[in-house]
Image (spheres, rainbow, N blue to C red):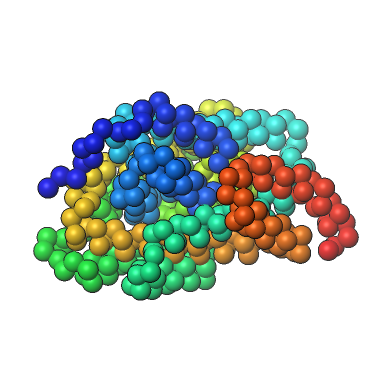
């Protein structure tokens, strides 16, 4: 009946919090890489989290709106330590990168922009493509395996994500249903409880967020709450939504400032979505940064901890397991497609292509090589090479 983990955890909550603090501090590469790091360390290296629990967390992170990596971290905190674990682990994962983007926001506001940012992103962006490509490869081989149905789902979602440059939520549900119908014909699963939970909140929240005329902090809080509650997908999926509100609708930032905000998200560790802290700081200082971050991450926290007990209770039933396998294959396919999208934007010339390939080769041959070392070297590479490329038009 219940599949709640009965065995006592082999680690403490403090150990998990310290790990998430570290990952939030030095975990570069966006949601794909961060999800890969969590699997490598927590599942494979230390055995703290089971493969089944990891897959459930990845599935829930894809089903619900909001930043995938943060939701996965919250769920993994919930596995053995329930609500307390989810809360402190989520905070530990987000706070380091939040403090970094606030500091960058202060520097940006006080020194009239960050002229070195393009050069750093030139190098880091290329290295990040290599890092997340390796993470996507590992996720694919571990979760899809040799199953033909899962490979079909994986390839379909990868292609759709690459072509549309977005993640289409209903395709994840469809993939889960296909896996369920193929492997475990239905007896009770007829209402799609996980999706129904997320969708059920939308009308109520939409009503709360419409027609309100509040001061600036209220406007910031409401806008970023909508970003966290209604945007499906991971990493850069939230960028078009932010652009529409921050630049076009509210005119809080201009085009250049917004592009710099996205660059900040890419050159800092932790979840890409943490750029909301940088944007909030530019709009309304430290209070704006805090309100923007809270507005963005609170919905994803709720969308994770509220359905989590049902995932833990019913997750190993054959029908649910088949549903989860289908969605997991779709999620990994979408992640792979997003790698290609990021590569198309970051690999703009011969030096960046060479740097991305070098990153893949280094990670392939040196299994213990730490990604932050590569990111630092790539940043230095960008600072040296970008001015030369830019001036000579290579």
Residue 111 position, x and y percent, is 76, 33
Residue nearest the viewer, comparing 75 with 200: 75
Residue 271 position, x and y percent, is 51, 43
Q: Seen from this angle, which residue lies furthest top? A: 14
Residue nearest the viewer, comparing 73 with 37: 37
Left or right, residue 186 beside residue 88: left
Residue 228 position, x and y percent, is 42, 45
Residue 188 in sight in this render: yes
| Residue 278 falls in image quadrant | top right
Vertical position of residue 261 compared to residue 342: above or below = above
Residue 289 position, x and y percent, is 54, 33
Residue nearest the viewer, comparing 117 with 240: 117
> Residue at the spot x=48%, y=57% of the render?
138
Residue 242 in sight in this render: no
| Residue 46 falls in image quadrant | top left
Q: Seen from this angle, which residue lies furthest right? A: 392
Left or right, residue 367 beside residue 297: right
Specify the quadrant that holds the C terminus. bottom right
Query: How many marks overall?
Result: 0
> Residue at the spot x=37%, y=51% of the render?
58
> Residue at the spot x=73%, y=39% of the render?
113
| Residue 319 falls in image quadrant | bottom left
Residue nearest the viewer, comparing 31 with 150: 150
> Residue at the spot x=23%, y=72% of the render?
182
Vertical position of residue 237 compared to residue 160: above or below = above
Left or right, residue 94 beside residue 269: left
């Amino acid at each position: 009946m219940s599949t709640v983990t009965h065995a006592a955890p082999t680690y403490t909550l403090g150990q998990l919090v310290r790990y998430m603090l570290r990952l939030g501090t030095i975990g570069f590469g966006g949601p794909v890489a961060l999800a890969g790091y969590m699997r490598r360390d927590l599942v494979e290296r230390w055995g703290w989290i089971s493969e089944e629990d990891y897959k459930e967390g990845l599935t829930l992170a894809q089903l619900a709106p909001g930043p995938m990596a943060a939701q996965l971290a919250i769920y993994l905190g919930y596995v053995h330590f329930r609500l307390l674990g989810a809360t402190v682990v989520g905070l530990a994962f987000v706070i380091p990168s939040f403090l970094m983007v606030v500091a960058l926001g202060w520097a940006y506001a006080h020194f009239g922009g960050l002229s070195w940012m393009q050069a750093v992103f030139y190098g880091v962006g290329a290295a990040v493509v290599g890092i997340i490509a390796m993470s996507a490869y590992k996720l694919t081989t571990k979760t899809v395996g040799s199953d033909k149905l899962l490979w079909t789902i994986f390839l379909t979602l990868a292609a759709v994500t690459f072509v549309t440059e977005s993640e289409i939520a209903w395709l994840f549900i469809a993939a889960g249903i296909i896996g369920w119908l193929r492997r475990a014909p239905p007896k009770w699963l007829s209402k799609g409880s996980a999706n129904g939970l997320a969708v059920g909140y939308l009308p109520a929240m939409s009503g709360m967020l419409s027609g309100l005329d509040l001061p600036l902090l209220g406007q910031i809080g409401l806008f970023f709450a909508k970003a966290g509650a209604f945007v499906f997908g991971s990493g850069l999926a939230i960028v078009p939504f932010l652009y529409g509100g921050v630049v076009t609708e509210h005119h809080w930032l201009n085009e250049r400032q917004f592009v710099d905000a996205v660059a900040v998200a890419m050159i800092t560790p932790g979840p890409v979505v943490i750029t909301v802290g940088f944007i909030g700081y530019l709009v309304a200082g430290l209070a704006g940064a805090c309100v923007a971050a809270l507005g963005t991450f609170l919905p994803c926290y709720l969308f994770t901890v509220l359905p989590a007990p049902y995932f833990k209770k019913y997750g190993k039933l054959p029908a649910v397991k088949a549903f989860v396998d289908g969605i997991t294959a779709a999620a990994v396919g979408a992640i792979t497609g997003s790698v290609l999208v990021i590569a198309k934007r970051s690999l703009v010339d011969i030096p960046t292509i060479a740097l991305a390939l070098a990153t893949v080769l280094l990670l392939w041959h040196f299994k213990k090589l730490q990604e932050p070392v590569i990111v630092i070297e790539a940043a230095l590479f960008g600072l040296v090479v970008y001015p030369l490329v830019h001036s000579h038009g290579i």
